[in-house]
Image: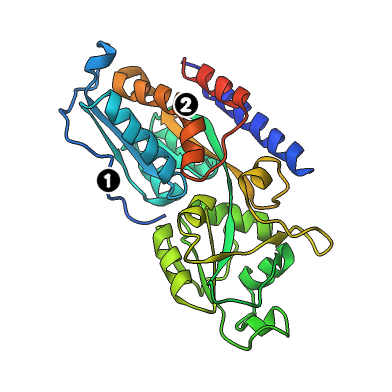
Amino acid sequence: MKKIRKASSLVTTLVLAVALMTGCGGSSQPSNAQQNGEQQQAGSESQPENKLSGSVVVDGSSTVFPITEAVAEEFLKVHPEVRTTVGVSGTGGGFKKFVAGETDINDSSRPIKKEEAELAKQNGIEWVELPIAFDGLSVVVNPANDWVDHLTAEELKLIWNPESTVKNWSDVRPEWPNEPIKLYGPGTDSGTFDYFTEAIMGKSGQSRADYTASEDDHVLVQGVSQDKYSLGYFGFAYYVENKDKMKIVPIKANADAQAIVPTPESINDGSYTPLSRPMFIHVNTKAMAEKPQVKAFVEFYLENVPELSETVGYIKLPDNMYQEAVKLIQ
């Protein structure tokens, strides 16, 4: 098993790749992919691939959830006796379980934090961080909103910063309606929250608190779709899945930049900035070593995620990134 420092090297490579291109939630209920199967005692003894059984336990990001759920559903067709559960506790909530050894894999919409890595070390948890796809955070409004043609990163900061005095749309631009702005966004355990606040505010976790927060992106979709004066943000896949219920907002990196809509092309080529980001799975290396079904699931994940990530609305990484990820689990 490769050491964790090599995982960190891969993430550094990925971050550099993103930089070059850019020019620089919920419940923990199992997904529908959960199937009945016999539990298997953890052990290092391998067995024929077509006779795998036991369980694979995944939790974490609601943003990564659609990808992992799709992988789990396809994996089930190949290994019907393996029971895979995919929970949605948010990236931070998932990491709390992961570093305590309660899960095999954490879906993560950000890299692991220093304090989380230290807790994992204290608990004897060794892990590998594997990038799986790109996402473009999507800023959305209600379909009835006919005044917002775009927002700048500075306007997003004006709206969302902890000391914000923005109460009405007219506080952002005087010509906009003098009506209360209703804000919807991920909760503080979400990696999407971490990334958005870091990209827009310059520091992770910095956000006004008077908004409707949820780790479940479907709750945010419902809120935005039902309120004419709403504004929200979440992962690109949830916009793609619900684009008939909301309108996406083009974003300008600065006042002089072009307003860019997140699309597979703009996310992949880095022109949708500053809200493009990589996503990850974090895997317990001991689980991979001792549970053949976990190792098989991770291998299956990396083999199939390029196609499945695009199927559910995200953007695949360059092929060499997946090749490097495979080396980390050999």
Residue found at the very far right of the displayed protein: 256
Secondary structure category for the residue under label 2: helix
- Residue 151 vs residue 38, the one in the foreground: 151
Give the left or right position of residue 211, taking residue 149 as reference: left
Give the left or right position of residue 290, taking residue 182 as reference: left
- Residue 23 vs residue 316, the one in the foreground: 316
Q: Position of residue 175 (x, y in %)?
A: 72, 85
**Residue annotated with mark 1:** 30
Residues at marks 2 and 1, CA–CA distance in whole angstroms = 22 Å
**How many labels, in total?**
2
Give the left or right position of residue 163, taking residue 86 as reference: right
Q: Amino acid at mark 2?
A: Leu
Is residue 261 visible from the viewing direction of this image?
yes
**Of callouts 2 and 1, the N-terminal one:** 1
| Residue at x 62% of width, y 26% of height | 9
**Residue annotated with mark 2:** 302
Circle 2 packing at 10 Å, graded few (<14), some (14-19), many (20+), is some
- Residue 220 vs residue 45, the one in the foreground: 220
| Residue at x 64% of width, y 48% of height | 276
